[in-house]
Image: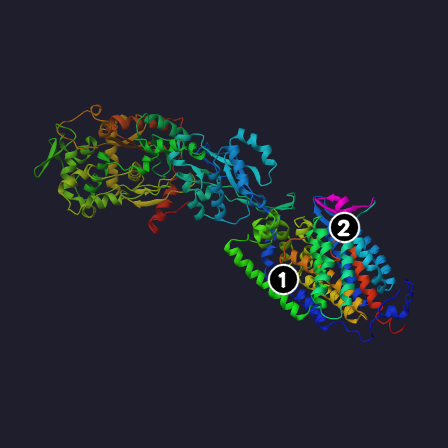
Amino acid sequence: MKIELEGEGYQPSKPGLIFIQCLVLALFVTFVLRFWYLQIHMGEEFAERASSNRLHYKLIYAPRGFLQDRNGVLLAENLPAFALTLNQQDCPDITATISQVSNWTGIPAETLLTRYQQERQKSQRPEPISLIVGIPFDQVAKIEPFVQRMPELSIETRTRRNYPHGALFAHILGYVAEANEKEMERDPDLSLGDDIGKLGLESKMEKRLRGQKGRAQEERNAYGVTLSSSIAREAQSGDSITLSLDLEVQKLAVKALGEHSGCIVVMEPYTGKVIALVTQPSFDNNAFSTGLTSSQWDELRNNPRFPMQNRTIQSEYPPGSVWKLVTAGVFLKEGINPNETVFCSGAYRLGNRNFRCWKQGGHGSMSMKAALMNSCDVYFYHMSDRVGIDKISAYARACGFGAQTGIDLPYERGGLVPSREWKRQRTGSSWQRGETLNVSIGQGATLVTPLQVAVYTSALLNGGYLLKPSLILSEPPQVTGKLPSTPEEQAFLVESMRLTAESGTARVIARPDAVMGGKTGTAQVRRIDNERLKTHQMAYEHRDHAWITTWAQKGDKSYVITVMVEHGGGGSTTAGPVARDIYRYLLDDAYPGSQPHMNLLSQAIEKFEKNGYSPDMQQ
Amino acid sequence: MLPLNPIERMDKQMLAHINWSLLLMMLALFITGIVNLYSASASLLEGGIQLNNFYQKQLIWGGVGMLTMLGVMLFDYRHLKNVTIFLYAAAIILLILVLLVGSIYSGARRWLDLGILSFQPSEAAKISVLLMGALVLSRSKDPLGPVGLLGAIAIGVVPAFLIVMQPDLGTSLNILMILGGLILFRGIKLWLCALIGGTCTLSAVGYFFLYKLGTLPSWWSMLHPYQQRRIMTFLNPENDPQGAGYHIRQALIAIGSGETWGKGFLEGPQSKLLYLPERHTDFAIAVFGEEWGFVGCVFLMALFCLFLLSIFTTARDAKDRFGTYIAVGVFFYFFWQIFINIGMVVGLLPVVGMPLPFISYGGSSTLVNFCLVGLVLNVSMRRFVFKTK
């Protein structure tokens, strides 16, 4: 066997050797640079992605605070509900998963996809997304075995808001419903499927009621097995709030109002606490938290009697003769002697126009007290023509009219106190003397809310202080303003109301066991023409509004009740009996009532005298 | 005169001339590989850390490899000149045989079942093409002309074709690339280079025009759908996070999250929590990158480069052409594997199945690696035998 030998001077090819060295150098440089890019330049980002690989977050839901009446009866509670959640991290094919869910539940896939995309756009947070909240139990039972086999889906227990008394407190409590896009944008704590208060106290007290969600962190391996978990933040449940409302009084008041449209305010004059706040007709707020169908919604919105409207604060009515409690105050302040009499012949002539009294034959000679007791219009025409509109509107404003009372409910309206300036701005024409006459008896452009009337009535009793109507039991009284009248002037008006309840237009509420006071009103919806019709002869929407504002004092108990019946006809015939029925319950010895904390009131007064009123929000 | 007995005595001079640095680098890489495999075998389950025995198996294969390597070092490599052609012919026959009677695993006919163990003829084909290429090219004293070039290419084309039929595109490309490395090392005549370059450019331009004119389909549409998908995944792994892109995405996360100093030995969550696929085999370096960080990766790259440069030293210092070409062939054998495997794991190349020498677990590849290092050591030992004849 011969092996070919090469010479001593063999040298491998130079270019080849250089080529090989270059390759090694290129290998080193390329990969070191790449490792530098991945590990140093992008290292932090990859480290973050590594932790989002293995660390999974779960939200721990915080129960919403309860709402209860003053005796601890639950008015808003939480019931268990089921939610289907989607974890993006574990979802290989969103579209397939969503169409599967759509198959199960019958909710269109596009709807679900839109929800998913909205939430994903909103945040890159790693928490699972609530696809559907509030799945009925039978459906949960049906889909659960399938869900267990899909790691990206899970069924979670949440809560659903329930109002055991539904329509009874619908306007006060409001309702909760799923937060919409705008609300989620405003509030970073909200995520898809979360409830938020949309109306009433649920909305106003949202921050206190909601609480704070907690967060748990789980470490999982590639097969989805949880290896460890820790709570990153405990959930904090929302505050439960005890309201000043009394379920029994509210029930009774609704019953007393019967089939009428209208509203009732029952409050304590020395604390501002609202015991009942009734608006009829009402709606079932439970329908909102379970999800309203569009036909239900249309029906509520288009109902001619506006069941969604909270009439105590959102409806502005002409006050009618109830307003005379304000106008009489102006007369006293302007130095008119209450004993000075005006002769009522049934009409007051101004220029070439006759201003009629409600009593066709006239009342004869009237002092201020008599004019209040009999609600004589001519007396007020006469005296208001003397003091003029400027005095009346300034005084009415100081009594809290034309401004919100500050109750903790959204969308409160302020009513309207007409004035020269208002008319100039509104119509461009100047004030007419005749309009002053109309304003003096609570007609014309004057508009008030029933709650304003109750607050004014309370102020007459409590020494002249306008109190913020309070729905929360523990809240100390807050003075929002002071009447522009002296204690003597207030005492005169209170005494006039007592007489009115004793023997005047409000005697329907009179009781032997208590000191009562009242003032009725019959607010015209259309002008009285020559033909005077009985209420039952008029079309419903032309009938007068019936008003009564009253107070009662019995031992430690003192209450103010204001009733307003839409198109109810006469104040004494329609509104009065409603107030009477409620007093029958409140003033019964079996009803415990509550002692007014006079020192709390004096503290509030002191604070007001020192600093004035600044709305002290509960949130 | 060269002794006719193929097994010679290992004398002192031979030992002195062994490429010790190559041996040292190889052992360093092998130990690094074992340490990394130990970590890759550990997984965090509910019951705590659990170990698979891959690193133990690798140690056994390493021992077997070491013995084989010693065997390869014992005879004078120049005897291979006479047997190479038979090895090559045997490899071709085996490749044909595997196509006819081979066993099918996961859709590919790659194995010959020999009863107790299965044998992959394509591994033998790699070594025999390496030797055949070295033999043929070492005979050509000048840069290759057209005949020489065609002859050299022909060595690879036949086995590469047979392996593609299995089908195993990766290995056949690997064979052609080793051969290509040898040809480039040999060099091609300048005018031939220019001619090839010119032809390639012209045909590319021509293809482009014909494609624009609509006469020819685009190269893209000529690919298999699975090939198209692989390329798309390589270009954008994020598009397909759970499918084919999953491997590469998890590997990048593992390596990147190692940052400068790494998560520490046995501390890499990506591998411990099983997010990283193929931790023992093709993606072993991702485990390493996660736990040892940039510093570790630079260290490993330095080891690989020193290892390759040690082979280069032997190629340079060999006293005959055949020795040089054997070393160069082995150089390219390792170079391409390192380049393609790391390139794939760090996302610079598409995903192809290719182990990282000494770091990835694998019995037969470890054995072949040790054998080939033994071959280079054989060449280095005998670089002065001519003086002492």
Q: CA distance from mark 1 to mark 2?
A: 38 Å
Q: Which mark is residue A274?
A: none
Confirm whether the magenta stretch covers residue B338.
no
Crowding at dot 2, Cα within 10 Å, few <14 / some 14-19 / many 20+, comes out as many
Q: Amino acid at mark 1?
A: Arg
Q: Amino acid at mark 2?
A: Leu
Tally of marks: 2
The C terminus of chain A - image quarter: top left
Residue B180 higher or lower than A159, as above or below: below
For residue A619, say whether it is visible.
no
Look at the numbered disc 2 and give the secondary structure of its residue.
helix
Q: Residue B154: x percent and y percent?
A: 72, 59
User: Label 1 marks which chain's residue?
Assistant: A
Report the residue marked by disc 2: B95
Q: Residue A175: x percent and y percent?
A: 42, 36
**Left or right of B158 on screen, residue A565:** left
Q: Are marks 1 and 2 on the same chain?
A: no
Q: Quadrant of residue B13?
A: bottom right
Q: Nearer the viewer, residue A513 or A407?
A: A407
Q: Residue A236: x percent and y percent?
A: 53, 43
Q: Which mark is residue A34?
A: 1
Look at the numbered disc 1 and give the secondary structure of its residue.
helix
Q: Nearer the viewer, residue A245 or A168?
A: A168
Question: Among all residues in the image, which is located at the extreme bottom?
Answer: A9
CB-based contact (under 8 Å), mark 1 and mark 2: no
**Left or right of A75 on screen, residue A322:** left
Confirm whether the magenta stretch covers residue B97.
yes
The N terminus of chain A - image quarter: bottom right
Q: Which residues are magenta?
A: B93-115
Q: Closer to the observer: label 1 or label 2? A: 2
